[in-house]
Amino acid sequence: MKYALVTGGSRGIGRAVCIKLAEMGFFVLVNFHASPEEAEITLQLVREKGSDGEILNFDVSSQEEVENVLGKWLTAHEGAYIQALVNNAGIRKDALVMWMKNEEWHDVLNTNLHSFLYVTRFLIKEMIINKKGRIINVVSLSGLKGLPGQANYSAAKAGVIGATKALAQEVAKKNVTVNAVAPGFIKTDMTKDLDEAQLKAMIPMGRFGKPEEVAAIVGFLASEEASYITGTVVNVNGGLYT
Ligand code: NAP
């Protein structure tokens, strides 16, 4: 059994990733925080692909919850290890720096950046011992380019990009790859408050992307075929480069 964990698998890009990994034969652990019904729908869609999965409820920004829930799962599944980890859960709380509240800064850093440490550190030892692992971090164009009104989010995603490159070098000899995928504007709940008509004029392909278009590259990076790719950031943004 090949196990994969997708944080924030309940909705949006995370859901599409769960479905893609199910198609590839992974048993998918679908993490959610606030949307249990959406997580159930994802699990149903995973099963429709002929695979199976399980729902894990934890807040990625809480070290205690991450270690508690994943620790219990590992104890209950002796001998199993999570071969593919997709650090996808994320939030935005946009504000100009001069108006930004400490809470908006810390919430975004905790959920998008500190979560990387809590979840990855807990699972990477088994990947190293088994000499096989795939870590894929969902970052953002915002972390490469910096977007006004998103200093917190840009900082968090840039932080994950730096951590991706560093960790990739730490574990490369153990056959564990670490890569990031940087979406541009993708049609999900996260972007539903944005003015799509205005923003798509800036995108060479003239449209927002679909979650499945991000999931396709995440799936490839999780596959055997991607065995010599590590420490990279792959853009999925319709040509909207920095
Ligand atoms: P979304 O539709 O808003 O979904 C966010 C997901 O993250 C949900 O499944 C949510 O689960 C989960 N989540 C949020 N906080 C969590 C927490 N504390 N613990 C566990 N899960 C949590 O967003 P999306 O567009 O799919 O975004 C997915 C990733 O892509 C994020 O990292 C985002 O920054 C990145 N991204 C998105 C875009 C875009 O245009 N959409 C562009 C670049 C990067 P619950 O509802 O269960 O809490």
Image (cartoon, rainbow, N blue to C red):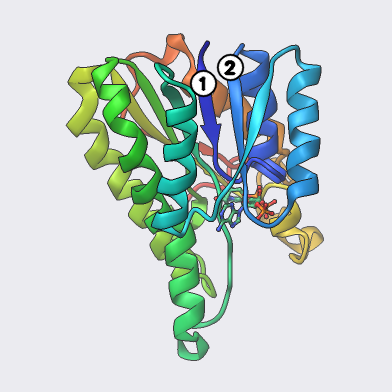
Q: Quadrant of residue 110?
A: bottom left
Looking at the rendered structure, which numbered label has been put on residue 26? 2
Looking at the rendered structure, which numbered label has been put on residue 12? none
Q: Is residue 87 above or below residue 228?
A: below
Q: Is residue 192 left or right of residue 233?
A: right
The answer to whether marks 1 and 2 mark residues whose Cβ atoms lie closer than 8 Å is yes
On the question of residue 137 being in view, the answer is no
Instruction: Give coordinates of residue 126: x percent, y percent.
Output: 31, 25
Identify the residue at horizontal 51%, vertical 77% (top origin): 104
Nearer-the-camera pick, 133 or 122: 122
Nearer-the-camera pick, 129 or 200: 129
- Quick one: label 1 or label 2, which is nearer the N terminus? 1
Give the residue type that dot 2 points to: Phe
Give the residue type that dot 1 points to: Tyr
Rate crowding at label 2 as few (under 14), some (14 to 19) or many (20 or more) other CA atoms within 10 Å.
many
Looking at the rendered structure, which numbered label has been put on residue 3? 1
Looking at the image, how many numbered discs can be counted on the residues? 2
Instruction: Give coordinates of residue 102: x percent, y percent.
Output: 44, 84
